[in-house]
Amino acid sequence: MKTLILTGVLVASPLVLANPLLGSWEFVEGKYAVEQGYVTAKAPELTSIKLITATHFNYITQKNGAFHYAGGGKYTLKNQQFVETFAYGNIPSLLGKSMAFDYKIEGNLWHHSLTENGKLVEAEVWRKID
């Protein structure tokens, strides 16, 4: 009986249920759909830091050392999806838009991808830095 109670406490523990995305992340690489196919990006040419709190995300990105873009807003986690809704940023077409990324964590890497109408739109890898 004690084992059953202890197991129940551990399963319900906040540590077990913790959000694996909380913290600071640095961009490693990405693949993005364009009209002609796909383009790729890798650090250090493209550098980005993404911060995830309990309710919000934000990021700032540089390309070859110069400001490129920034944005953020609220997010939710549902069924292995990171659903972000842009509330602010310098890309007007993203404002108010929600995007649902499939994600998985492997060690200190966060892989996420966005598919629309059966086509890969974006796939990125981020490395946890705290």
Image: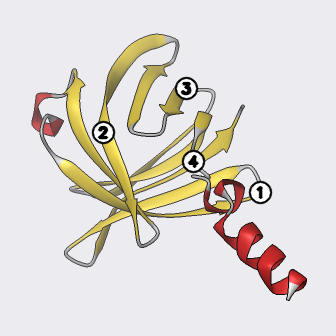
Q: CA distance from mark 3 to mark 2?
A: 22 Å
Dot 1 alpha-carbon crowd within 10 angstroms: few under 14, some 14 to 19, many 20 or more: few
Q: Secondary structure at mark 3?
A: strand
Other-residue count near label 4 (Cα within 10 Å), few / some / many at <14 / 14–19 / ≥20: some
Q: Residue at x 62, y 52 (%)?
A: 20
Q: Nearer the viewer, mark 4 or mark 1?
A: 4
Q: Of the residues shown, which amino acid type is indicated by label 1? A: Gly
Q: Where residue 75 appears, x then y in whole percent? A: 34, 46
Q: Are marks 4 and 1 in contact (CB under 8 Å)?
A: no
Q: Earlier in the sequence, mark 3 or mark 2?
A: 3
Circle nearer the viewer, 3 or 1 = 1
The circle on residue 21 is 4
User: Label 1, on which residue?
Assistant: 107
Q: CA distance from mark 4 to mark 1?
A: 12 Å
Three-letter code for the amino acid on which mark 4 is drawn: Leu
For the residues labelled 3 and 1, say whether their Cβ atoms are less than 8 Å apart: no
Query: In the visual, does 124 lie left or right of 23?
Result: left
Name the residue located 80 percent from the left edge and 85 percent from the top edge.
Answer: 4
Observer-nearest residue: 26 or 38?
26
Earlier sequence position, callout 3 versus callout 1? 3
Q: Whole-Å distance between the Cαs marked 3 and 1? A: 21 Å
